[in-house]
Image (tube, rainbow, N blue to C red):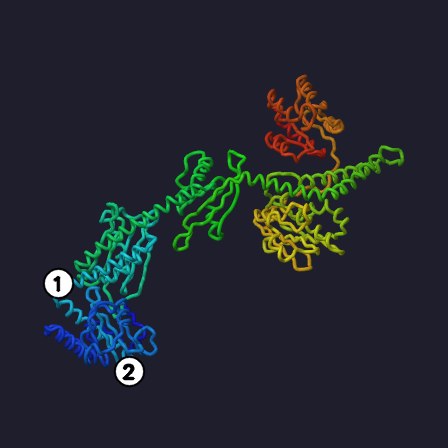
Amino acid sequence: MSERHNHPDGLKPRAQLPTPLEETGSSSSVAQRMLALAVSTQDLAVLHGEILDLVVPAVGADSGLLVLGPAHGKHRCFFSSHGPAARLPWSPSLAAAAEETRLPVVVADLATDARVAEGGELIAGGWHAYLCQPILSHGRVLGTLHFLARQQERFDATSLGPAATAAHVLALAVGSSGSAAEQQEVGREDEAELLMHLSRSLGNLTEQHQVPGVLLDTLARLADPDLAVIVLEESHLPWDQAMREYRPISEDLRVAACGDSLDALTRAGAAAPLDVRVREMRRGSGVLQREVAPVWRSWVHQPVERAGRVAGVVSVFAQRERAFSEPQRRMLTTVAAQVAMTLERLESVAEAERIHLESVVDAMGEGLLWIDGDWRLRMANAAARLLLQELSAGPQPPRMQRLGAVDLKLVAQQLETAPRYHSEFEMEPGPRRMSVTVSPVRGRGGATDGMVILLADITEQHALQQKLVQSEKLSALGEMISGVAHELNNPLAAVMGYAQLLDSDLVELDGEHRQEKIRTIHREAYRCQRIVQNLLSFARNQNPERRPTDLNAAVQAVIHPLEYSLRVDEVEAILELAPDLPAVMGDAHQLQQVILNLVNNAQHALREVPGPRRLRISTVQRDGRVVVQVEDNGVGIPADKLGKVFDPFFSTKAVGKGTGLGLSLAYGCIKEHGGEIRVQSPPGQGTCFTLDLPATSAPIVGQADEPSAPTQARKPVRSCSILVVDDEPNVAAVIAEVLSACGHRVEVAHDGREARKRIREGAVDLIITDLMMPHVSGHELYEDVRQHSPELAARMIFSTGDTVSEGTREFLRRTGNAYLTKPFQIETLLEIVEKALGKLE
């Protein structure tokens, strides 16, 4: 083991430092003479003077002074090697520093060292270098030796050996002399001062983890140990083990001391700590220490008792024999009692704060939970307890790793890189919607040690938000309606024109030309269907459904019904859509609504400027993201309003124009999709909104842009009896004619009452019924059939032109039956019929 030495500030060692009473070269004779004086001289005054006469030249000083007692307190100046001590200036500030650190203090130049408060007075007396050596006995400071020199940088490493030897001899002489009463009085004064200081320090603490630091400072003055270890129980937390070394200690000795203190805790009657957090509170080591042997020769373990149980232990260790006196052991007992009282006080304060905090937390309307690092539920307020009872079908598991639809283990992984986690889920029994916000709990070292969960019922808030979304949709639809009417009228004109042409004798058409006109009618009717479907998709109030979505298709679906309106406003719509654009995982209707809102806003802004008016929409793939930009050269947004555009109810439009919710809802929608929405509006250069969404590799399930090829009649595997119910005669006739051509036996009823009669009169294999009919609706007909023939009710097919109303969509979801959306393709009709008939045995 190599030697380890710490050197005081300002000291430049020229050689290996000698330790007290170690004979090194010329200092050996000085040490021997000092020891001889200590043995032979009975008069303390004479001994002090003779030792000073020996040590002053040995350290290279011009004068020396002995001060017994504390520097700032009741002390006595005894002997100087040159003249009366009272006439020799000295530095109480350096003496206090030596007493505090228990190390020698060397000042090479009093003129440049700011530590010396009395530097000016000393320099005025002709002194320029200073050495202060503490006199220690059993960890207690008896006084200080002061050496002064008229030459700068007079003291070096070789000066410390004689000074330390003199201090050691004087400590032995002073400690063994004087009356027992005087020594006891001094000891009691020191003990009282130490205990008062400890009491004040402990009384100022507000948290238990601060106790070891104060206690370790006190142990240095109380017992002069080489190492101290403190183990304290901490409620609901790992036991706190704090350690500080006061002199260089090997790693083996540190480990041994930690183990010994825990063993002492168990022997004292405490339950063995299952978890111990070790804190090494290093303060710095002493100076002039020999290489140490890897054994402890002295130790004291003092239990800390609270309410009749052992709650900790205070341990001190030393490598020297008989290091701790009986008074020091008694003092440790007193110190442990003070620590116990402090812990009781802190626990009472913490308990009062806990009760107050619980009352505050229980008053919250939202549920608040605390889960520790082992997934144990440590705290739940009243609202959270009620919600947990509803979420848990049975008893709460000991480890809480799931909350409703939220996997808390996955959440914990996300919290390693994110400040918080937020999601929403539907709660059964519903319909109830819950909001979950999770934040990490950080331990003292900054590591994650559990999570805090805020659980809120946002059913009403969500319903209100959906109404606001719907309001914004209807506002946008109001602006689209003229364009939609124009887009519908164009294909309808072709349908009506060719239909009249085919029904007239104005033109003679052969078979091929007649068939071409029929296909045109079909194609234009399908175009009308697509326009209506797009309009309904914007108007529909439906639950979000995440799936791979093509943003190019979303842009085109928005622009198509607006083309006429844009042309009327003389706006040039420029689409720069990247080919092979990856999909994004999202709700297509929500994303279309966001794009529609941005386009509508741009169109409004362009109306305020003269031509040319340009609206550019672009898509691009960038770094695993899909970026959509909607850019116009309109009036732009004033700089003072740019930061408010995403605020609810904020609008730059005139009063009565819009709801002021579009951009706020767009912001929330894009954030829910894991993306970002940004805005730029340089003065006089229009506005550019950017949507940035994460791409997905999942394939896009597309829709046909053209109607299917003409359907060829196909014969069924078996001929079945089918009842078609519709109050629109033409629709019922078309369905009946198609199914009859496929070989089925088809009957037609034009309302629900007639259908009931037909069902009772004969066997029916399948029913195709409209939902909205006078007298008896399709809903009522279904319920009637379900009561008498559940199997037949399961094979009912519904047809409807209303997929917007919540009642219709809820009915279709509840029954689970197949349905046709008018207008429909014949191929779709046949596929649904064959699938329903497949349920027949």
Mark 2 residue crowding within 10 angstroms, few (<14) / some (14–19) / many (20+): some
Q: Position of residue 61 (x, y in %)?
A: 24, 80
Q: CA distance from mark 1 to mark 2?
A: 44 Å
Please say if 67 is above or below 583.
Answer: below
- Quickly name the residue at label 1: 181
**Residue 368 as seen in the image, left or right of residue 15:** right
Classify residue 153 by image quadrant: bottom left
Amino acid type shown at disc 2 = Gln
> Where in the figure is residue 502, as x and y percent of width and height?
84, 34
Q: Which residue is mark 2?
A: 151
The vertical placement of 656 against 392, above or below, is: below
In the displayed structure, 803 sits above or below 258; it is above
Circle 1 or circle 2, nearest the eye: 1
Asked which quadrant contains residue 460, the reply is top right
Establish if 370 lies above or below 284. above
The percent position of residue 82, horizontal first and vertical second, equals: 19, 81
Q: Residue at x 15, y 67 (%)?
A: 175
- Can residue 341 be seen at all in this image of the molecule? yes
